C-alpha cells in the first residue's frame, strides 16, 4: 500500500497510511512535503520527535510565508 501511495505521489494516502500504521515520522514528513509546515511542526512536537522539531523550526524561521508564527 505504501508503494502505491508513493508511486501516485498522493499526500492524503500517505498521511492516512501513516495513521493506520502508527508511523508518526511518516505523517510529519508527508505534512512537510505537502507544505503544511505548522501542522507538521505541531505533530512532531506533540509526539516528542525533537530532531524533526528542530529541523521544522529552522524551516519555519527561514520561510517568509510564516513570519507571523
Image (tube, helix red, strand yellow):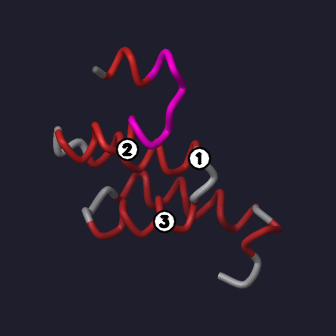
Q: Is residue 41 above or below residue 67?
A: above
Residue of label 2: 15
| Secondary structure under the numbered disc 3 in the rendered image | helix
| Secondary structure under the numbered disc 1 in the rendered image | loop
Q: Is residue 57 above or below residue 16?
A: below
**Where does residue 41 sit, x and y in percent of width and height?**
47, 64
Residue at the location (75% across, 62% down)? 62
Measure the alpha-carbon separation of dots 3 and 1: 10 Å
Q: Is residue 43 magenta?
A: no
> Which residue is more in the foreground, 16 or 64?
16
Measure the alpha-carbon separation of dots 3 and 2: 12 Å
> Which residue is more in the foreground, 28 or 61?
28
Instruction: Please say if the residues under marks 2 and 1 sit with CB atoms less than 8 Å apart.
Output: yes
**Where does residue 65 sit, x and y in percent of width and height?**
79, 68
Instruction: Please say if the residues under marks 3 and 1 sit with CB atoms less than 8 Å apart.
Output: no
Instruction: Please say if the residues under marks 3 and 2 sit with CB atoms less than 8 Å apart.
Output: no
Labels 3 and 1: the sequence-earlier one: 1
Q: Which mark is residue 34?
A: 1
Residue of label 3: 39
For label 3, the crowd category at 10 Å Cα-Cα, with few meaning under 14, some 14 to 19 and many 20 or more, is few
For label 2, the crowd category at 10 Å Cα-Cα, with few meaning under 14, some 14 to 19 and many 20 or more, is many
**Where does residue 46 sit, x and y in percent of width and height?**
29, 70
Residue at the location (65% across, 57% down)? 59
Residue at the location (42% across, 69% down)? 42
Labels 3 and 2: the sequence-earlier one: 2
Amino acid at each position: 500500500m505504501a508503494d502505491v501511495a508513493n508511486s501516485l505521489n498522493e499526500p492524503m494516502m500517505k498521511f492516512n497510511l501513516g495513521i493506520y500504521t502508527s508511523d508518526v515520522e511518516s505523517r510529519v514528513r508527508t505534512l512537510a512535503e505537502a507544505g503544511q509546515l505548522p501542522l507538521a511542526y505541531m505533530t512532531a512536537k506533540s509526539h516528542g520527535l525533537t530532531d524533526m522539531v528542530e529541523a521544522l523550526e529552522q524551516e519555519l524561521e527561514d520561510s517568509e510565508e510564516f513570519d507571523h508564527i
